[in-house]
Amino acid sequence: MPSLFAKVKAKMDLYAHEKVRSLLDGQYGSVFKGRSLDFDDLREYTPGDDVKDIDWKATARSSGIRIRRYQAIRKHNILLVVDTGRHMAATGKSGSNKRDISIMAAGVLSYIVLRHGDLIGLVSGDAKNNTYIPFKGDDRHIEQLLRHIEKNTQLAAAPSNIVNQLEYIARNLRRKMMLVVVANDDELTGEHQHIIRRLRAQHEML
């Protein structure tokens, strides 16, 4: 059976050069005063800095005391929230199948997450059911996520209702995450807006 993730990467290679993909990647690192594994740069000593961070060789070459700064690189948790209700099995106004677009969107994002060394998980479902696949960060895991979306986005499924998936996350998942929602193009109702405000208090949302 052909790999869905391989198909996604092949289409990215067709439509985007490596330089463009790198722009999509973004940067997750941030600089903190404390020590970490990755050296970032030097700066002047200020009162209160830890003397263990002094770079004595750089200090000897300069007119002032130099402190090493380090880049804190953290694994991020990216959660795909995917509508697999029957509305997503239909054909959109463009003539494209919504399920195929959903798989492509999930695959492209997963590719970017994988390149960063971060972790990706999935919450999917419809008006009646929810499925949670925990966070991992490898090709096999991404293939599992994409296959799950393909298998469960069917005309025989219950109607779409992304609020059901968002409420599941609010009830069951406590860790801080970035949520990326892939759903049917319905108007946002008061019910949508209420749960989105609730989740944004803890998570980043796209």
Image (tube, helix red, strand yellow):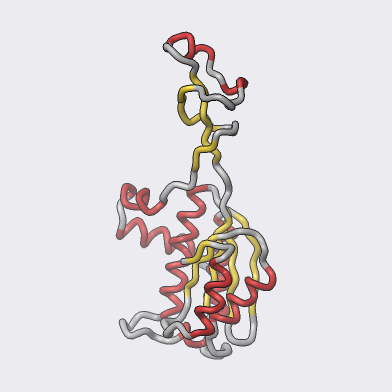
> Considering only vertical position in the picture, is 197 above or below 97?
above
Residue 84 in sight: no
Q: Nearer the viewer, residue 96 or 105?
A: 105
Residue 143 place in picture, x, y as percent: 55, 63
What residue is at 49 percent from the left and 71 percent from the top? 181
The quarter of the displayed image where residue 13 is located: bottom left
Residue found farthest to the right = 172
> Considering only vertical position in the picture, is 85 above or below 41?
below
Residue 12 place in picture, x, y as percent: 36, 59
What residue is at 35 percent from the left and 80 percent from the top? 96
Residue 52 place in picture, x, y as percent: 62, 21
Residue found farthest to the top = 60
What residue is at 57 percent from the left and 67 percent from the top? 145
Residue 21 in sight: yes
The quarter of the displayed image where residue 80 is located: bottom right
Tag count in the figure? 0
Q: Nearer the viewer, residue 23 or 101?
A: 23
Residue 105 place in picture, x, y as percent: 43, 67
What residue is at 32 percent from the left and 85 percent from the top? 93
> Considering only vertical position in the picture, is 112 above or below 94?
above
Q: Is residue 91 left or right of residue 126?
A: left
Q: Nearer the viewer, residue 85 or 163?
A: 163
